[in-house]
Image (cartoon, grey):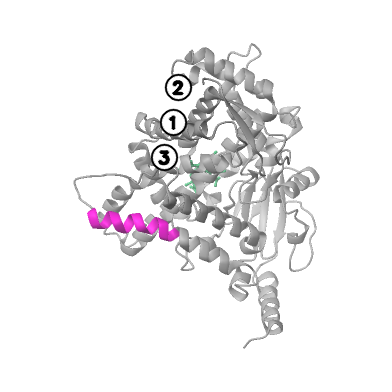
Amino acid sequence: MISGTVLLLGAFVALIYFVFLKKPKWKNAPPGPSGFPVVGNLFQMDKHNHLSFTKWAKEYGPICKIDLASMRMVIVSDYKLVKEIFAEPAFSGRMDFSNIDFIMDGKVHGLANTEGEHWEELRRFTLRQLRDFGFGKNTMEESIMTEVTELIDGLKEHGEKPLEDIKLKFTLAVVNSLWSLCTGIKYKQNDEELIKMTEDVNKAFHEVQEGGSIILFMPWLTKVMPVWSGYEKVKREILKMADSCRKPMLDHKKTYHEDFDRDFTDVFLKEIRKTTDPNSAFMGKLGEDNLVATLGDLFFAGTDTTASTLAWMMLYLSKFPEVQRKFHKEIETTTGNSRMCAISDRPNMPYTEAVIAETLRFSSITPQGLGHKAMKDQEFHGYLIPKDTIITANIFHIHFDPTIWGDPENFRPERFLSPDGKTFKKHEALLPFSIGRRQCLGETLARDSLFLFATNVVQRFKIEFDTKGPDHGFEPVISFILTPMPFNLILKDRLA
Ligand code: HEM
């Protein structure tokens, strides 16, 4: 049996090789904190990575660089520069997530992890098909509203007892509308299979978070020490989730009929069947793996994000009753409380839009977006950014920059309103969905979901913070995304 010492020695030799021998020196690099040999700045990073990124932005300016073991990273902390750099094809690669890929064969699949031609093919196809199947259309609204109604019924039944996990309730509702669009499968919100699948995703998220920096920034360590680095557990959970995505594909293959496109899975299978180009992302077995991974990406990227944002909003509304009062008043004025809110109400609800925008800013659930990668050596504002450098948008810093927002620490929806309060004002520095060529693919669905869930829940219930339950302020749980720590709400039915 190989001893721990031998393993450690092996890891050390591999590390020296990767850091010192494989990586050429970076001439003309942006400024940044000096780090330690071998590990660079890795252990100078706060467990809330975004707090360190903010500190470094203040010290070294809008373009700075850090070294995370064998990985070099450029942090961009000015929204105009983020817009510029993310519009560049050379900077639209993706940080190497091959060790958390759904297929786990050492390569990358799906659309969030891939880059280059395969990514372009998959992104174009997915956007077009999801639009055809409902993104931004009435059918999508109907599907979300079915879930909103079921959620509200469940909340009514719960009564005025402390409600412990509003985020889970939102997650189950959001998953359902997304999953029926992608796979045609429709669950009840209390269905055990749905709950299990959601729990598996949460576990996968949790394991990645626990393995955190090491898994992402020292990927080679996961090969040398799969158990010690926590990678075995991460892999197990991700593969479980991949099985949940493979099942609908296998079921659809059995019942597939060329003349009927039932959902996204069917049209993807159709594309696989008609593809003959061996270099295509839709070719044969690779096509099927890409379908499994794309379903996984949509599930992974679409559910926890939307549900966490809604959970943060409920927390803010319970803590800022005056905001809730104004929000509710606008809902009442618009609908007369004789019907539920619909997407068509949006242009008449500037305060609501402002509450959503301020929630996206204040929660900043993806504080550093998703790392991009330079696909070739490319100059940017006088610096030569070498191929394979990771580029990170410092979204949290931008969202809390006092030179942009004046009083960023205050939750103040009015910052997104015209002085007379009648018009919603977009702000260029609000980048919750990132920007440019890899901008969030689900933004329309996310925005529709946020609007419909939030307005209709607030129309029905007065939301109060349960002072007898846990109170962590606005402290987030550390994860891939920032989600609220546990809190309890008391929901009082306004229309009972
Ligand atoms: C409040 C909700 C959401 C937030 C804040 C959010 C945020 C983001 C961010 C910051 C990125 C990284 C973009 C980049 O690389 O520059 C991203 C990518 C992505 N999002 Fe979202 N997202 C949300 C909801 C959704 C939903 C509902 C879906 C799908 C149904 C979705 C699907 C995706 C996909 C597939 C990508 C990868 C795009 C690519 O690599 O080309 N997201 N999202």
**What label sits on residue 177 in the rendered view?**
3
Element marked by disc 1: helix
Q: In this rendering, does residue 98 appear at all?
A: no
Any atom of ligand 1 within 8 Å of the CB at mark 1?
Answer: no
Using the image, tell me which numbered label, if any, was put on residue 340.
2
The x and y percentages for residue 473 are: 73, 38
Above or below, 328 against 376 in this view is: above
Going from N to C along the chain, the mark reached first, 3 or 2, is 3
Location of residue 324 in the rendering, given as x and y in whole percent from the top left corner: 63, 23
Decide: few, some or many residues near mark 3? Use Cα within 10 Å; few <14, some 14-19, many ≥20.
many
Label 2 to label 1: alpha-carbon separation: 9 Å
For this rendering, which residue is in front, 464 or 392?
464
- Distance from label 3 to label 1 (Cα)? 12 Å
Decide which of tag 2 and tag 1 comes sooner along the chain. Answer: 1
Residue under the point 65% across and 53% down:
384
Q: Indicate left or right for 198 with 351 as reference.
A: left
Residue 313 seen anywhere in this rendered image of the structure = yes
Left or right: residue 60 versus residue 274 is: right
Q: What label does residue 149 carry, if any? A: 1
